Amino acid sequence: MVPQNQQAQRTQPQPQPLPRKGMNPVLCIIVALVLLGLLVGLAILITYLTLRPKKLVYTVEAASVQDFAIAKDDHISAKFNYVVKSYNPEKHVTVRYHSMRISTAHHNQSVAHKEISAFKQRPKNETRIGTQLVSHNVALSKFNAKDLRAETTKGLIEMEVYITARVSYKTWIFRSRRRTLKAVCTPIMINVTANSLDGFQRVLCKTRL
């Protein structure tokens, strides 16, 4: 037989755990609304900074020409050397250049161009792009050939630099769609009697996005 004291211990009910108190539903709603408000505010700020960025600043810092010649049949051959500076004035926005083309022209007639490799420009960053645009036996209009010959006799030729790029903006985790950036730099006065980049007056470009 089982002793009575052991049987009483087996049949004694176990103490039930105290029920846990749940969070106040009103408090949960308030916390959720505050977090939602912060996320919406952050999204609006990111969208504003990305969709309305400050204008990128472009300048031509130096320019020279080598092996400049205009043939009797109005064809030009030359090596145009340019140093272009790009400045990103944003404090929190990074600019990514997916593609870029730099071309040079005389009175809107392009004579040479070059593709630039993709690169990234961080906030408040200045990037210098040194490039040589080669014009090899390119046909000129009668007007441009005559005008360039006249400018050459004076020692200075007036050129233009055009920049076209596909860019996107990124801030934190948000990235904008790709846009087309265009910059026009004129007038670019180049001394045809010297191959050096010294003595060139910096030219501020007009940009459009």
Image: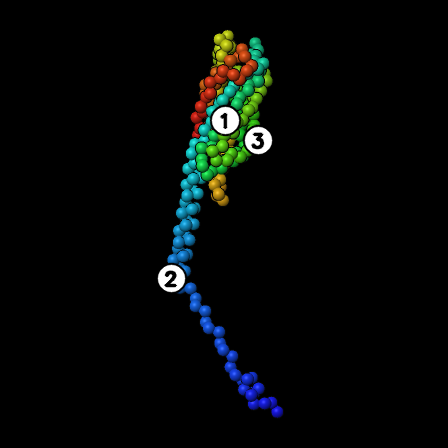
| Image-based side of 52 in relation to 73, left or right | left
Vertical order, 107 against 115 (above or below): above
Real-space CA distance between mark 1 and mark 2, rounded to the nearest whole angstrom: 57 Å
For marks 2 and 3, give the one nearer the viewer.
2
Secondary structure beneath label 3: loop
Q: Which residue is mark 2?
A: 26
Picture residue at 45% right of the left edge, 69% below the top: 20
Circles 2 and 3: CB atoms closer than 8 Å: no
In which image quadrant can residue 118 be found?
Answer: top right
Real-space CA distance between mark 2 and mark 3, rounded to the nearest whole angstrom: 56 Å
Kind of residue at disc 3: Ser
Real-space CA distance between mark 3 and mark 1, rounded to the nearest whole angstrom: 15 Å
Q: Residues within 10 Å of mark 1 (few under 14, many from 20)?
A: some
Q: Which residue is mark 3?
A: 117
Q: Earlier in the sequence, mark 1 or mark 2?
A: 2
Secondary structure beneath label 1: strand
Secondary structure beneath label 2: helix
Q: Residues within 10 Å of mark 2 (few under 14, many from 20)?
A: few
Picture residue at 46% right of the left edge, 21% below the top: 203
Q: Which residue is mark 1?
A: 85
Instruction: State the residue in front, 75 or 15.
Output: 15
Q: Residues within 10 Å of mark 3 (few under 14, many from 20)?
A: few
Kind of residue at disc 1: Lys
The reply to whether residue 73 is visible in this rendering is no
Q: Count the marks: how many?
A: 3
